[in-house]
Image (cartoon, helix red, strand yellow):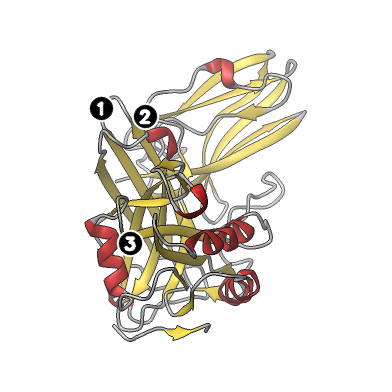
């Protein structure tokens, strides 16, 4: 792995659906700015580096994806040390941007961090990537689902050169005490999941990756999250990076969590689905309501309901078939709720 030069996600905006079809060719795909910080509990300069990352994460104009690997000390683990070695074991702290650029040391790193993050996030990527997770502390198990797609007009020439990598992290990890009395550590890498090879390379091609994750009983599943990125080992370059969405847990959420004062739906449960999923939605008053399933190009697949409904909570189900009752192809879909008082929408993955 070449040494780094010093100083030197499927990102799709939420659509105002009902007005804009779910298509992948309209806009260039933004590249998520992956930032990997290598530090430790005992590192005196790491607090400055973490402050620099916090400033990036708080800027909504940047698509920044961050994680911290503890390369030594009580929060170190085999996976974190392996990532540190992957980049040539840089000094602590070192923040690596997009797999190829780095900033070593602490102090006032905000300008350098922002400059590199803007450079990475300002570039386009030929890969759409989305990820969702759920963790169950009772069964000590979790799942991470990753959807990848090559948009129209894009291509990845040698997809097998790219590895799909995922990191499970925990925020608010308590380990007393670091320099300056710091005792809580954000986004600590707990586990790096096995690599998957990218197979999608031509326009419209789709790939799905699913990880089943055994949880360590010492981890707090309420504080766990995941990041996913595509990386090429020949130079460390990162093609795309995203923060996984919380899929809402393994059990259905209580209906009381819905806001009944407006047209609103909860994410389908389960998602991804293999046989059937439920979409639960509310209407603030009696009105006509329609729930449809569209494919990634915006074409109608199935209408689940279309007509008058009373106010309150409603359920509709999709069994993965189209309007003729034929099994739909595996892939990414859009569910769309349309009422007289508003709309709601989201993405849905069908596994075959």
The one nearer the camera, 41 or 187, is 41
Which one is earlier in the sequence, the residue at label 3 or at label 2? 3
Seen at 62% across and 74% down, the residue is: 122
Q: Specify the quadrant that holds the N terminus.
A: bottom left
Residue 317: percent from the left, percent from the top?
46, 26
Inter-mark Cα distance, 2 to 1: 10 Å
Seen at 52% across and 75% down, the residue is: 153
Vertical comparison of 5 with 320: above or below: below
Q: Are marks 3 and 2 in contact (CB under 8 Å)?
A: no
Which picture quadrant has residue 29?
Answer: bottom right
Vertical comparison of 138 with 296: above or below: above
Q: Which residue is mark 1?
A: 139
Q: Which residue is mark 2?
A: 250
Inter-mark Cα distance, 3 to 2: 23 Å
Q: Which residue is mark 3?
A: 165
The one nearer the camera, 195 or 274, is 195
Residue 143: percent from the left, percent from the top?
32, 41
């Amino acid at each position: 792995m070449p040494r780094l030069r010093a100083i030197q996600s499927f990102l799709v905006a939420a659509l105002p659906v009902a007005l804009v079809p779910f298509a992948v060719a309209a806009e260039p795909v933004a590249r998520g700015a992956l930032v990997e910080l290598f530090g430790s509990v005992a590192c005196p300069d790491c607090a400055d580096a973490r402050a620099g990352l916090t400033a990036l994460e708080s800027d909504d104009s940047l698509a920044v994806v961050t994680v911290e690997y503890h390369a030594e000390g009580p929060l170190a683990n085999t996976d974190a040390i392996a990532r540190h070695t992957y980049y040539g074991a840089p000094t602590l702290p070192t923040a690596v941007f997009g797999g190829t650029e780095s900033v070593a040391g602490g102090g006032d790193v905000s300008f350098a961090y922002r400059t590199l993050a803007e450079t990475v996030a300002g570039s386009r990527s030929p890969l759409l990537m989305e990820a969702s997770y759920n963790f169950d502390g009772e069964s000590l198990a979790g799942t991470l689902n990753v959807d990848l797609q090559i948009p129209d007009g894009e291509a990845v020439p040698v997809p097998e050169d790219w590895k799909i990598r995922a990191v499970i992290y925990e925020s608010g990890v308590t380990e007393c005490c670091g320099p300056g009395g710091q005792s809580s550590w954000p986004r600590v890498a707990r586990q790096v999941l096995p690599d998957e090879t990218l197979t999608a390379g031509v326009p419209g091609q789709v790939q799905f990756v699913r990880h089943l994750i055994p949880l360590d009983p010492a981890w707090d599943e309420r504080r766990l999250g995941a990041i996913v990125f595509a990386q090429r080992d020949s130079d460390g370059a990162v093609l795309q990076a995203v923060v996984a969405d919380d899929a809402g847990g393994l059990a259905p959420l209580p209906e009381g969590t819905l806001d009944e004062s407006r047209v609103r739906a909860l994410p389908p449960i389960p998602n991804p689905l293999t046989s059937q999923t439920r979409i639960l939605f509310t209407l603030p008053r009696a009105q006509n309501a329609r729930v449809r399933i569209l494919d990634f190009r915006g074409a109608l697949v199935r209408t689940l309901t279309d007509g008058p409904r009373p106010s309150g909570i409603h359920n509709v189900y999709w069994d993965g078939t189209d309007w003729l009752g034929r099994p739909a192809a595996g892939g990414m879909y859009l569910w769309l709720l349309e009422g007289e008082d508003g709309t709601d929408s989201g993405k849905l993955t069908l596994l075959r």
